[in-house]
Amino acid sequence: MNQQSNVVVAASRFSDQAESRIIEAVKAGDMQAYEQLYQRHVGRVYALCLRLTADRALAEDATQEVFIQLWRKLDNYAGQSKFSTWLHSVASNVAISYMRKQKSWWQRMFDIEDVELKDERPAQPGHQRDLELAMQQLPEKARIVFVLHGVEGYRHEDIAEMLGIATGTSKAQYHRAKQLLREWMGHE
């Protein structure tokens, strides 16, 4: 390893150690430590919730609920995986739960007419922001599966369990999302 790699690895270890200390302080009831944990992770949690819900207000509500759940359930975090991985799982479950609570979401989720697409298409293909906009235009089932599998790295088996669908349905929705995004983004 070169000197720069050593610095990055050392900083990463320090970050993990610092986060472990913060987590232990939060478990002991330290509100300042909780604020640090919140500030460290709120951006990524909100981004995940927004990608899953495609609705800013719902994503904001889900993000708040994630951090409420974090406060309540942090004792369940045993440290066997990275904290960010555990928090990511909590955030995914909370966002999906919020979407399920939306009666109109359930109606759309299982409606055959889900095939209809919104008329809006992202302009200027090829930019990261345009991909985010295109993802928001995906039909909900396809968007949720695409975000969970393609962006967040969940396995189709895990997605199927989270959403209460068959593994094959998860794979089909992922394929559908990829096809639509390729079409909208100019086959890039």
Image: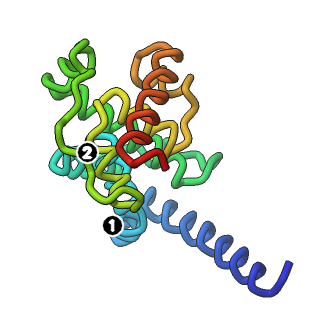
- For image coordinates 43% across by 32% down, the residue present is 145
Q: Position of residue 41 (x, y in %)?
A: 41, 62
Q: Nearer the viewer, mark 1 or mark 2?
A: 2
Can you identify the residue that label 1 sits on? 31
Numbered disc 2: secondary structure: helix
- The kind of residue tagged 2 is Ala
- For image coordinates 31% across by 36% down, the residue present is 138
Q: How is colour applied across the structure in the image?
A: rainbow
Q: Is residue 30 above or below residue 45?
A: below
- The kind of residue tagged 1 is Met
Q: Is residue 178 left or right of residue 144?
A: right
Q: Position of residue 27 (x, y in %)?
A: 45, 56
Q: Is residue 61 above or below residue 37?
A: above
Numbered disc 1: secondary structure: helix
Q: Position of residue 60 (x, y in %)?
A: 21, 52
Q: Quadrant of residue 154?
A: top right
Classed neighbour count for the residue bearing mark 2: other residues with Cα under 10 Å, few (<14), some (14–19), many (≥20): many
Can you identify the residue that label 2 sits on? 62
* Residue farthest toward the right in the current orientation of the protein: 1
